[in-house]
Amino acid sequence: VQLQASGGGLVQAGVSLRLSCAASEGTFRKYVVGWFRQAPEKEREFVAAMQWDDGNTMYADSVKGRFTISRENADNTIYLDMGSLKPEDTAAYYCAAVLGYYGMGYILPNHPADYNYWGQGTQVTVSS
């Protein structure tokens, strides 16, 4: 599967922004799709993930309650709705995918090394 991320931009703190990750070749069926972010001079960190087939989701503590991951089946697209943005959310955001089914109640892959398909980054900059 090939991934295409989009939707980044420069916004003020407190506003919302939606990122998209589309499967340009193939579908996300039987995949876990995740969002990661990487700020300058920092390691890439987990943001959120979704099991495409059953909608099971998982979030990093730093974004829980502010960010929502969702899917649009018809478009083979995963979204990351980011609310109440903070300057510390500034980073390049990447979507990634790994083949596998983990079932409801299981912890989804949440480390970059767990994923083997990556899209290009999309920059999100939040000004104070």
Image (cartoon, rainbow, N blue to C red):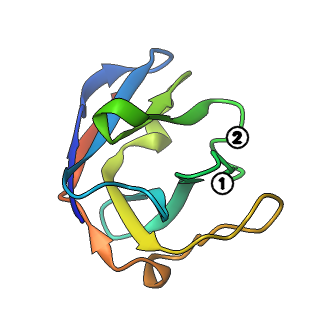
Percent of width and height locating residue 76: 32, 42
The residue under the point 45% across, 76% down is 112
Q: State yes or no: discs 2 and 1 in contact (Cβ < 8 Å).
A: yes
- Depicted 5 relative to depicted 42: above or below: above
Q: Residue furthest bottom?
A: 113
Query: Looking at the image, can residue 43 be seen?
Result: no
Mark 2 crowd level (few <14, some 14–19, many ≥20, 10 Å Cα): few
Query: Looking at the image, can residue 18 be seen?
Result: yes
The residue under the point 63% across, 29% down is 66
Amino acid tagged 2: Lys
Amino acid tagged 1: Ala
- Depicted 21 relative to depicted 94: above or below: above
Mark 1 crowd level (few <14, some 14–19, many ≥20, 10 Å Cα): some
For the residue pair 116 and 19, the one nearer the viewer reads as: 116
Q: Classify the position of the C terminus by image quarter.
A: top left
Q: Secondary structure at mark 1?
A: loop
Percent of width and height locating residue 84: 56, 21
Q: Exactly how many numbered labels are in the figure?
A: 2
For the residue pair 108 and 12, the one nearer the viewer reads as: 108
Give the labeled residue for mark 1: 60
Percent of width and height locating residue 99: 45, 74
Give the labeled residue for mark 2: 64
Q: How far is mark 2 from mark 1, CA to CA? A: 6 Å
Picture quarter containing residue 108? Answer: bottom right
